[in-house]
Amino acid sequence: MKFPLISDIATREVVHVDISSKISEALNVLVENIHRNVVVIDGSVFRIFTVIDVLNLQQNKIPLDSKLSSLDLQEVPIIYRDKNVLDTLEYLQNSIEYICVLERDGSLFGLLTHTDITSNIDPDTLMDNYKLSEFLKLGRRMKWVDKYTITSVLLEDMISGAFDNVVIVEDMKPIGILTTKDILKLIQNKSDVTLSVSNYMSQPVETINKNASIKEALEYLKSRHFKRIVVVDDKNNLSGIVSQKELISLTYSRWATLMQDYQDELSQINNMLKSKNREYEAMASTDALTGLYNRYKFSELYLSSYKLMLQRKNQISLLLLDIDFFKKVNDTYGHNIGDQVLIQVSHTIIKALRDIDIICRWGGEEFIMLLPTTSLEKAKGIANKLKKNIAALELDVVGCITVSIGASSIQEGEEMKDAVGRADSALYLAKQSGRDCVKSELDI
């Protein structure tokens, strides 16, 4: 197995302008080349001018004859052309999906995109046993609207929420998608944004079923040259969106195992892997926002805890926690504030639990906790303590929040999904009972 050099996979044809250029010049380059972004060279720093920047300009009525240097353009990470593709993994948590490739003298050699990285991953190295359905809740935030949404309202929402794509649905079935390319057409054609988004969306939407494997999903991306996958269930209802970056992150664990079978390659990259192994391991097992375990790592730790429970004949319980009205927090204060709420809640959970307890961000505003040597009655007591501690938080801007919690006990001979299902049912009951409360499987 060979891991290619950056110079072998980078795109050499890079659309770029100088930081001293006028905004109108950069906009013309965008339109003429039908690009979503333009690289802006700022001395030894490289920045990106995007369609979202154009929308911000229009919203703030900034003159197009202003210089690009007057804008707060995001800096693009850099990598040298003689580096290995493995060196790109550290950039996968970056919100920008581009990396500027440089010559050793600092001049621009080319551009590396997530597509370039994806195209150089052998599908045979991926985790064939993982399905998209197991991965969706860990995916990036998804934005969807109905077809009657006014385009101008949606564009403002995309700016505030930093969304670069929106799925348009009818009865929860995807009928179109609005991407930065579609926005570029809106700007170029000076379209009437008071009309509904259905007038400007791209359609039809190509989708993939949530039961597809990670390998199938990556092959799907490569064959269609897509940046993202729209995922649906068996009834063709929207289930989520998964980006290239998220799929690439999943491949590392499998890569690490396969590399042991290629001693020649290992001898060349061994020093590099020693210094970065912990970082890669964290990428594969933790949630990027909160630092808690992700559901893949949780599933692994659940099995080991379950086996220990059987050996020692101990009780073990499970809590599923959901932040009440979290969507309202995001809608009212924005996703950045929402992210801060998630971080503070996760810290509060960590402080309240023991070192032996396993805590995971289950997805969105949900957290799951595995409590070894704990009866269901004690688990409810811990849940009520958690609920009280979180309610006592004084959060900036938001003020106070509440949570609902469902509890279940792990039974011998059952699968994890059954225990989680009972906790989920108890959580649903807590929501139906007015929220800000704890319910267990015994209350169902």
Image (cartoon, helix red, strand yellow):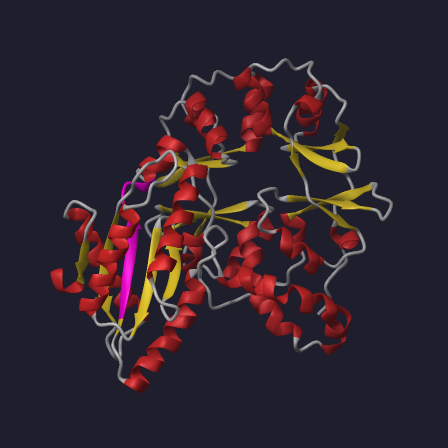
Residue closest to the far bottom: 311
In percent of the image, x 62 and y 44: which residue is there?
A: 97
Find the magenta span and give its range: 317-326
Residue 111 shown left or right of residue 175 in the figure: right
Residue 350 visible at all = yes
Residue 118 visible at all = no
- Quarter of the picture containing the N terminus is bottom right
In percent of the image, x 63 and y 55: which residue is there?
A: 90
Main secondary structure of the magenta stretch:
strand
Where residue 384 sits, quadrant-wise, is bottom left
In the image, is residue 203 above or below residue 129?
above
The picture places residue 104, in percent across and down from the top left corner, at: 85, 49
**Residue 324: in magenta span:** yes
- Quarter of the picture containing the C terminus is bottom left
**Residue 38: in magenta span:** no
Foreground of the two, 224 or 366? 366
Foreground of the two, 155 or 411? 411
In the image, is residue 317 above or below residue 6?
below
The picture places residue 17, in percent across and down from the top left corner, at: 76, 28
In the image, is residue 375 above or below residue 31?
below
In the image, is residue 40 above or below residue 172?
above
Residue 59 shown left or right of residue 347 in the figure: right
Where residue 266 sits, quadrant-wise, is bottom right
Where residue 141 sits, quadrant-wise, is top left
The picture places residue 131, in percent across and down from the top left corner, at: 44, 62
In percent of the image, x 40 and y 53: which residue is there?
A: 347
Foreground of the two, 220 or 385? 385
The picture places residue 188, in percent across and down from the top left corner, at: 60, 20
Residue 69 shown left or right of residue 352 in the figure: right
